[in-house]
Amino acid sequence: MKEGTAQSAIYRKDYTAYPWDVTQLDLHFDIGIETTIVCAEMEFRLKDGDSADLVLNGSDLDLLVIELNGRLLAPDEFRIDGETLTIPDAPQHSALKTEVKIHPGKNSALEGLYLSGDFLLTQCEAEGFRKITWFPDRPDVMTSYRVTMEADKTEFPVLLSNGNQVGSGDLPGGRHWVCWHDPFPKPSYLFALVAGDLALVEDHFKTCGGRDVSLRIYVEKENLDRCSHAMQSLVNSMRWDEDRFGLEYDLDVYHIVATNDFNMGAMENKSLNIFNSKYVLARPDTATDADYQGIEGVIGHEYFHNWTGNRVTCQDWFQLTLKEGLTVFRDEEFSADMQSRAVKRIQVIRDLRSRQFPEDDGPMAHPIRPDKYVEINNFYTATVYQKGATVIRMYHTLLGEQGFQKGMQLYFDRHDGEAVTCDDFLAAMADANQVDLEHFGRWYGQSGTPQVQVQDRYDPARGLYTLTLEQHTPSTPDQQDKQPLVLPFALGLLDTDGHELPLQLEGEPDAVTGTRLFVMDKTRHEFTFTGIANKPVPSLFRDFSAPVKVYFGYSPDQLATLIEHDSDPYTRWDAAQRMAQNTILEQCQMRARGQEMALDGSLVKAFRGALSDLDTDPALLAETLKLPDEEYLSDQMDVVDVDGIHAARLFVKQELALELEPLLQQRYTSLNDGQPYRKTAAAMARRSLKNTCLGYLMETAQGEALANAQLEASDNMTDTLAAIQALVLKGLPAAATALSAFESRWAGDALVMDKWFMMQAVKPGSETLGTVRRLMEHPEFSIRNPNKVRALIGVFAMLNPTGFHAADGSGYAFLADFVIELDGLNPQVAARMVTAFNRWKRYDEDRKALMQTQLQRIADTHGLSGDVAEIVKHALA
Ligand SMILES: [Zn+2]
C-alpha cells in the first residue's frame, strides 16, 4: 500500500524512451516465506552519450547491498525518492548489483511475491516487479532473464520461472537450486516465479513446425482430478492459433499454475501462466457450464498473449488495449469457433452493454487508450478490454478475414521482439491493405458510446425507401467535444412477411442479396433503396457491427417480424430485448403513476413464437428468453427507479410464466430427459434452455416441486446451482435445506463455496444485507481472498440493486466500511469494489445524498491508497 502518498497523474504525451539498454539480467532468489533475499545483477548500456542518470523503480524493498561496476556505493552516491532510485551520472557501461530483502508472507496486496496457501508466487503486471527488486519496471525495457532459485527442498520441491530449465542441483542442509533461462527478451511485468509443493498434470503438444511442447498444469494435490478441461482447452488453443492465425508456440515447455488468491482472472507470464483457480479447476460436479466456457476462454486468452502481448508488447501502459483488446478479440473468436458463434456473440454484446456502456457514461469514462492515469491498476477496465476488442472487430469487419490476417502478419514482421503502440498496429493494418485508417483511429482517443438516431421514409409511388442515420457521442467528464467516428453499418431489409429484400441503392446497376456493409464516417448519412414494393423492416447494425446505441422507433409488429424471421442472430435477439425492455419500462412507468401493471399481448406472442420454434439452437433461444438485467434497464432511465425496475421486471416475468406455462413446461420436460451428464456443446445448450425455462416456471405453482426434483436428480453443478438459486431467489422454505446440504457437502472447497456465497448475496431485498454480514463471519469467508470478496461483497454491491440500494442507505454504509477496511490490505480489489458507487448521480435525491456521504467518508479516510482515491475523486467530481 502506498500510504498517504498524494499521487499525481501520469500523461501519455509525456512518454520518453528509457535511455539505457539492459544487456544482461541475472536474478538470484533465496526463497523463504518470512524473508526472501533477491540479488539482481544487471548490465546497463547507455543508448547515447557517455553518462546519464540511471533510474530504477522499487517499492517496499529493504536494500542490503548496492554495487556499481564492482564497487559498493556509499549512501551519498545514489538517492531513493519514493519509488525511484537514482544513480547520478552513471557511466555508459554500468554493471549494477543489488541485494534486497522482501517479506512475501506479509504481502496482502497480492502484487509482487506473495503467499497463497503453502506456496509462493508472483504477480507483476502492471507494476508488481518493483516490489521484488530494483529495476526499470516499465514495459518498454526488455531483456533476457536468467533466474536462479534456492530453497528448502521439502518445503519448496517445485521451483519455476520463465523459459527453459537450464540447471538444478542439491545443496547442503536439505536445500536445492534450480536455474531457468528465458531466451526471449521480455519486460518485467511478464516475469514470474513459483515456489512450493505442487502437484503436476502433464500432456504434450506437437506444433505445426514439429516442436514437442511439454504442457504442465500445477495445482494443489487435492485438485489433480480437476485439470482435464483446462488441459484440453490449452491444446485446442494451441491448435487454433496455428490454424486461424498461423502462430506457433516458441518454447519447449508451457506451465500453468492455479492459485486461490489472485486479484484478476489470470496472467500471461511468458511460459509460466498464473491463473485464478476459478479458470483452471473443473469437474462436472463442481463447475457449471459457464465455468467450463470461462476456463476455455481464459486459457485461450492467456495462451494467445504469447504473440499478442509477449512477443510484441506495449510501449507504455496507455497502450494496454494494444495487447488486451486484440487478445480479447482473439479469445472471443476462439470460443466462437469452438462453440456456437451466435451465442458467443450475444453473450459478448450483452456483457459490453451491461458493463462497458455504463463505464462510458460514468465518472471514469476514458478512451480505450487513456490519455492519463493516476493508478494504472484502475484502467484494467471493460473499456480497455471489451470495447477495445470491439474496435479490433471493426478492423476485421472493414478489412475482412484475409485483409485482417495480412495486417496481423505485417504487424509481427515489423514488431516481433518490440514494445510498440496502438498507432503501430493501425499502421500495419493500413499498410498491409493499402487503406487509409487515420479517421478510424479516432476510436482510440474518444471516450463515450456513440448514439445513432435512425429515421426512415417510404415513398410507395416510386418504390423508394430511405434511411437517415445520424451519429452523436454525448460529452463525457474527460472530454467535451466529440468527433464523428467511422462506423461499419451492416444492414438488411425484410418485407412484412420476413423475407430478405435485395438491396439496390439509387444509382446502382444491380441489387445485392443479403447483408450490405456500409461505412459511416460523417455525422449524417442517407441511404435510398429502390425497387421496394412495400414498407420494409430494417435490420440495423447486424452482428452489432459497431458498438453504438441505436435509436429507431420500431413498432411492436416490426420487432415481432425481426424476432421471428431475421437471418441475423444478433438482430433477432436484440429485437426481443428491445421488446422486453419497452414492456418492462412501460410497466415501471405505470407503477410510478400508481396504475395497475398490465401487459399488452405482444411480448407474450413473440415469446410464444420463440418457444414453439424447435429448430433454433436451444442456447440461442435461452438468450432470447432472458429478460434484460436490472443494471441494463437502469441505464435506460434518466433517474433510476430501483424498486420500480425490480417490480416491473418481476411482473413481466410472472405474466410470461403464467401465459406460457404449458409451453414452458413442455420444453422443460423434453429437455429434462434424465440423460447422464455430458460436456458437449449440444448438452450445454439444452441445459441452458432447460434452466431458463425453470426460472420462469418458478413463478408458477409447480416451481418449487420442479426445482426440488431437479436438485434431487442432478448429477452436475449446472443443474444443481440453477435449482438452488431458483429456490433461494423465490425465498422458498426448501432453500434453507438446500443451502445447508450444499454447505455440508462442499465445506472446505474454496471455489464451490464461492458459489454458495454468491447464491445468497444476489437475493433481492433489503434483508440480504443481514445475510451478507452474517456470512462474513463464516469460517470460509476471508477478506484477504479476492474471490471471496467478489462472491459475497461484489455480488451484493453490483448485482443486487434492491439490496445494495436499500432506501435507508444501509447498503452504502456497509460498502464504505468494507472498502475502507479492504483498502488497508488490498487496494487493487478495494478500488474495484468502490466503483459500485460510480453512478450515484443517476439515482433519486435521497439515494444520491446517502451515496455522496459515503463517498466523502471514504475520500476523507486517512492513508487511503492511490487506487481507491482516484476512483472516489472522479466519482465525487
Ligand atoms: Zn489479457
Image (spheres, rainbow, N blue to C red):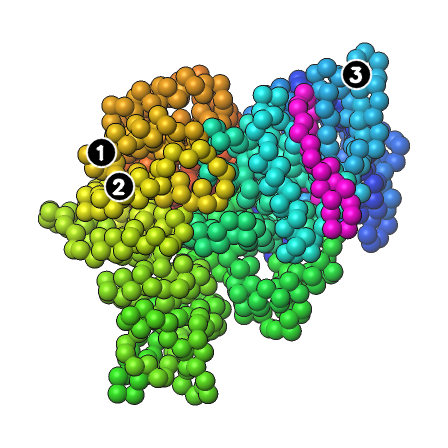
Are the residues at dot 1 and dot 2 in contact (C-beta closer than 8 Å)?
yes
Spatial CA distance of label 2 from label 3 is: 65 Å
Residue under circle 2? 665
> What's under tag 1, amino acid-wise?
Gln
Q: Position of residue 471 (x, y in %)?
A: 39, 68
Is residue 654 in view? Answer: yes
Q: Position of residue 559 (x, y in %)?
A: 28, 62
The answer to whether residue 426 is above or below residue 584 is below
Secondary structure of the residue carrying numbered label 2: helix
Spatial CA distance of label 3 from label 1 is: 64 Å
Tell us which disc is closer to us: 2 or 3: 2
Mark number for residue 689? Answer: none
The answer to whether residue 40 is above or below residue 493 is above
Spatial CA distance of label 1 from label 2 is: 9 Å
> What's under tag 2, amino acid-wise?
Gln
Q: Position of residue 552 (x, y in %)?
A: 30, 66
For the point 69% across and 56% down, the residue is 246
Disc 1 residue crowd, few under 14, some 14–19, many 20+, Cα 10 Å: few
Secondary structure of the residue carrying numbered label 3: strand
Q: Nearer the viewer, residue 22 or 398?
A: 398
| Mark found first going from the N terminus, 2 or 3 | 3
The answer to whether residue 765 is above or below residue 22 is above
Residue under circle 1? 702
Q: Answer with left or right where residue 671 lies relative to residue 131.
A: left
Residue 202 counted in the magenta span: yes
Residue extent of the magenta highlight: 187-216
Q: Position of residue 171 (x, y in %)?
A: 84, 17
The image quarter in which residue 179 lies: top right
Residue under circle 3? 175
> What's under tag 3, amino acid-wise?
Arg
Q: In which quadrant will I find the N terminus?
A: top right
